[in-house]
Image (cartoon, rainbow, N blue to C red):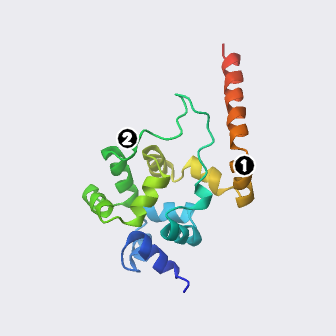
Amino acid sequence: MKKTFKQTMAGLFSTAEGTFYKWKREQRPIISLLEKYFTKEDLEEFLETGAVARYELDAIQPKNENTPLKEPVRSKFGKDYKVAASAVLDCTLASYYNWAKESRPVISLFEQYFTKSELEEFLRTGGIEKMEIVAGLSLEDLKLIRENKEVIIKFQEIKQLLQGTNNV
């Protein structure tokens, strides 16, 4: 049986079906973030598989000290991360800890797809640059990027080297 949007959101938050609409009326940042970057199908896919295929694209960046692929785990899931996540969720830090302890899917979605700095960026600007880029790509574009990831990374490394020599 196909789920309604209310049922999908209730599953994501592990709450009653009306909670999404209440939070939408309250203009909670989490609702803006979900509506901006995830379709109902994306969220259903996440609830069923624990992943959203179109966001499983690794960051297309060269690996060096200046451009890390991910923030270190201790900062991603430490107290600072949880403070940023609870601000987007518009809940207390204690509620965030309780939701994590209850294994609510929305916490897994956050921890899987957003760094602390990305959540802070969303709170400051209403957007996340990385998500904007990926959200704007077609599935065919994403497939092409995945297939040619090594070439793209090498190209970016060369570009950085060339830019470095121009600054000398």
- Look at the picture and state if 23 lies above or below 90: below
For the residues labelled 2 and 1, the Cα–Cα distance comes to 31 Å
Point out the image quarter for the N terminus. Answer: bottom right
The kind of residue tagged 1 is: Glu
Residue at mark 2: 75
Q: Secondary structure at mark 1?
A: helix
Q: Seen from this angle, which residue lies furthest bottom? A: 1
The kind of residue tagged 2 is: Ser
Q: Residue at x 58, y 52 (%)?
A: 131
Left or right of residue 129, residue 145 in this image: right
Which of the 4 quarters of the picture holds residue 135?
bottom right
**Mark on residue 31?**
none
- Look at the picture and state if 19 lies above or below 140: below
Of tags 2 and 1, which is closer to the observer? 1
Q: Residue at x 68, y 49 (%)?
A: 146
Q: Residue at x 54, y 39 (%)?
A: 69
- Look at the picture and state if 125 lies above or below 46: above
Left or right of residue 35, residue 111 in this image: left
Nearest the viewer among 92 and 10 is 10
- Look at the picture and state if 6 lies above or below 53: below
Q: Residue at x 36, y 75 (%)?
A: 15
**Mark on residue 147?**
1
Which of the 4 quarters of the picture holds residue 156?
top right
Q: Position of residue 20 (x, y in %)?
A: 43, 74
Q: Position of residue 28 (x, y in %)?
A: 41, 64
Q: Position of residue 93 (x, y in %)?
A: 28, 55
